Image (cartoon, helix red, strand yellow):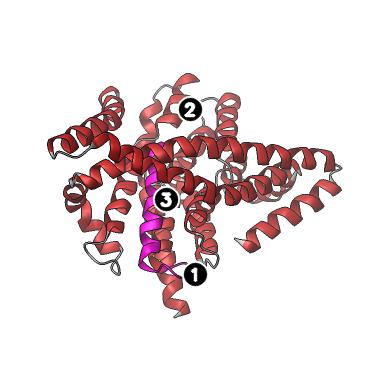
């Protein structure tokens, strides 16, 4: 992230200088700061809400039943997590929320999953391979039905807006598979 | 489509209802549980905030500098060779960086090209199959204070690129079928 940030910032200043847009650049970084606050306030609400709900299903034992149900795939993907560890459940719930396009639930549950993964290695500031697998699956955004996109296509008078469901599904699964493939390949090469 | 969208509307309310009733049946103090769980949210968001700030400032600044137009010019020539609509470049570039901006760009593409054009279809599939990678990285890594990310960021970026190529190929394949 360090490299990415340096590249973005340095390139922005240099390019805005070349384009004579230094003013716009300065204005935009303040706008960026403002939207970080707005997004954080939004996150504050939904993260707290879902952490509250999660606590209920944890304390009532419902979470174990849910995770027993969906664990098979998650266990296969995350071999180094002990079977009874809470990370399995939070990862499962996050993936389900993603699958159904519930972005507002997916992010809080994903944060919880990261915290549970971190609990396996409490002292490290270095990312674990399990965290990488989890993040790569998340950035591939496996989603069954892209509602927002279909809505926009329909708004502008598309003849058959849901025609994109199948291609999107194929694309999202293939790119998730490739993403994981790349991750596992890189690990093998660097070993 | 109607049933599918009905089901997806039902998921969250039903899930919450079920969670509460199940807890109640198991004699859990549901309200107190909720409040004590929710308390944790403040800490998480406070921890994530500086990471979000860093990434938002960088992305907004990058957009304002005109760097996108520059990159678009470079890529346009390349895509022309493969008979891919040039508008696809803008959505492919913005999607990993910003969710709200990519929604704006997508709406604009649909508006100018028509909803059933190749450009709109490819953009729609990219919108549905790619994620705002930098936001996910900032929030998830920030939440647990990871500093050394090893090879994660390059892998994510290569995966994004592959994902966009997959999206373009699939739509082109489907449109050849008719």
**Pointer 2 chain:** B
Q: Does residue B133 lie above or below B38 as drawn?
A: below
Q: Main secondary structure of the magenta part?
A: helix
- The residue lying furthest to the left in this view is B25
Mark 1 nearby-residue class (10 Å; few <14, some 14–19, many ≥20) = few
Q: Nearer the viewer, residue B15 or B130?
A: B15
Is A108 inside the magenta-drawn segment? yes
Q: Secondary structure at mark 1?
A: loop
Q: Badges 2 and 3: C-beta atoms under 8 Å apart?
A: no
Count of numbered tags: 3
Q: Give the residue number, with chain letter if any, for mark 3.
A: A111
Q: Secondary structure at mark 3?
A: helix
Question: Residue A187: x percent and y percent?
Answer: 43, 73
Q: Residue at x 21, y 62 (%)?
A: A84
**Pointer 1 chain:** A
Q: Give the residue number, with chain letter if any, for mark 1.
A: A126
Q: Nearer the viewer, mark 1 or mark 2?
A: 1
Measured in 3D between alpha carbons, the distance from the residue under mark 1 to the one under mark 3, in whole angstroms, is 17 Å
Is A84 inside the magenta-drawn segment? no
In the rendered image, which quarter contains the C terminus of chain A?
bottom left
Q: Nearer the viewer, residue A115 or A92?
A: A115
What stretch of residues is rendered in magenta? A101-128
Q: Residue at x 34, y 42 (%)?
A: B36
Which circle marks residue B116 in the picture?
Answer: 2
In the rendered image, which quarter contains the N terminus of chain A?
bottom right
Question: Residue B98: x percent and y percent?
Answer: 58, 42
Q: Can residue B116 be spotted in the picture?
A: yes
Q: Badges 1 and 2: C-beta atoms under 8 Å apart?
A: no
Location of residue B22 (image quadrant): top left
Q: Secondary structure at mark 2?
A: loop
Q: Earlier in the sequence, mark 1 or mark 3?
A: 3
């Amino acid at each position: 992230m360090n490299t990415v940030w340096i590249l973005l910032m340095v390139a922005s200043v240099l390019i805005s200088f070349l384009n004579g847009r230094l003013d716009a650049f300065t204005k935009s970084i303040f706008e960026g700061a403002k939207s970080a606050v707005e997004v954080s306030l939004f996150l504050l609400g939904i993260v707290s809400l879902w952490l509250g709900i999660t606590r209920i299903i944890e304390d009532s034992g419902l979470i174990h039943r849910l995770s027993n149900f969906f664990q098979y795939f998650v266990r296969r993907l995350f071999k180094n997590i002990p079977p009874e560890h809470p990370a399995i459940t939070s990862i499962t719930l996050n993936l389900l929320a993603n699958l159904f396009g519930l972005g507002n639930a997916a992010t809080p549950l994903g944060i919880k999953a990261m915290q549970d993964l971190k609990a396996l290695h409490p002292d490290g500031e270095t990312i674990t391979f399990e965290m990488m697998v989890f993040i790569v699956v998340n950035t591939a955004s496996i989603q069954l039905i892209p509602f927002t996109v279909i809505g926009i296509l329909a708004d502008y008078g598309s003849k058959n807006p849901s025609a994109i469901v199948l291609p999107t599904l194929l694309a999202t699964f293939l790119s998730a598979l490739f993403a994981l493939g790349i991750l596992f390949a890189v690990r093998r090469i660097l070993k | 489509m109607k049933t599918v969208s009905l089901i997806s509307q039902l998921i969250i309310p039903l899930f919450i209802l079920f969670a509460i009733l199940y807890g109640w049946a198991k004699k859990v103090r549901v309200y107190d549980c909720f409040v004590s769980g929710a308390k944790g949210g403040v800490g998480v968001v406070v921890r994530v905030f500086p990471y979000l700030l860093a990434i938002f400032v960088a992305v907004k600044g990058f957009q304002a500098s005109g760097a996108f137009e520059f990159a678009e010019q470079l890529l346009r020539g390349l895509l022309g060779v493969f008979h891919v609509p040039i508008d696809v470049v803008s959505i492919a570039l913005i999607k990993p960086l910003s969710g709200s901006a990519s929604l704006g760009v997508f709406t604009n593409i649909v508006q100018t090209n028509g909803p059933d054009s190749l450009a709109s279809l490819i953009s729609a599939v990219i919108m549905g199959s790619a994620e705002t990678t930098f936001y996910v990285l900032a929030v998830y890594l920030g939440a647990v204070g990871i500093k050394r990310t090893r090879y994660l960021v390059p892998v994510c970026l290569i995966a994004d690129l592959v994902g966009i190529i997959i999206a373009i190929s699939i739509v082109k394949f489907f449109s050849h079928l008719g």
